[in-house]
């Protein structure tokens, strides 16, 4: 089993899913820079979270920075066009938000 941590921006708002057993689950994907070159494409990594971590993930939105760590799994599927696709996913055991809390509670640029 492989463990990993990844830090990146959410590509879209996380989706809420309820498992067959009725447990809350959330899925998302983050864009991770793997090269210092600004023109290099990011690596997209899926994030899967259950329970309270799913709630934490759902508090974030597209473009937010976050870090996720946990067990790595590989998912493969075939598109409707017959193309084989693959994605690495982290089954999260920790999610850390990169949001900054401002002592004043205000937004940047607020007077």
Image (spheres, rainbow, N blue to C red):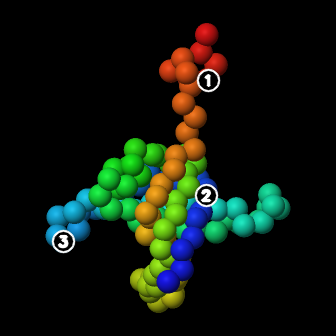
Give the structural element (helix, strand or loop) at label 1. loop
Q: Earlier in the sequence, mark 3 or mark 2?
A: 2
State the quadrant of the C terminus.
Answer: top right
Q: Earlier in the sequence, mark 1 or mark 3?
A: 3
Q: Is residue 92 above or below residue 105?
A: below
Residue visible at 54% across and 30% down? 101
Q: Is residue 23 left or right of residue 6?
A: left
Residue at the left extreme, as displayed: 21
Q: CA–CA distance between discs 1 and 2?
A: 23 Å
In the picture, the disc for residue 100 is: none
Q: CA–CA distance between discs 1 and 3?
A: 42 Å
Residue at which label 3 appears? 20
Q: Earlier in the sequence, mark 1 or mark 2?
A: 2
The answer to which of 53 and 83 lies nearer the viewer is: 53
Q: What x and y, as percent, mark residue 57?
A: 41, 52
In the picture, the disc for residue 108 is: 1
Q: CA–CA distance between discs 3 and 2?
A: 30 Å
Residue visible at 48% across and 54% down? 95
């Amino acid at each position: 089993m492989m463990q990993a941590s990844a830090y990146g921006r959410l590509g879209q708002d996380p989706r809420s899913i309820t498992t067959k057993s009725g447990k809350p689950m959330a899925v998302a994907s983050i864009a991770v820079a793997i090269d210092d070159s600004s023109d290099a494409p990011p690596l997209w990594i899926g994030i899967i979270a259950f329970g309270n971590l799913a709630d934490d993930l759902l508090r974030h939105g597209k473009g937010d920075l976050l870090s996720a760590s946990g067990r790595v799994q590989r998912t493969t599927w075939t598109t409707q066009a017959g193309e084989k696709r693959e994605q690495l996913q982290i089954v999260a055991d920790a999610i850390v938000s990169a949001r900054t809390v401002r002592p004043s509670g205000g937004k940047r640029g607020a007077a």
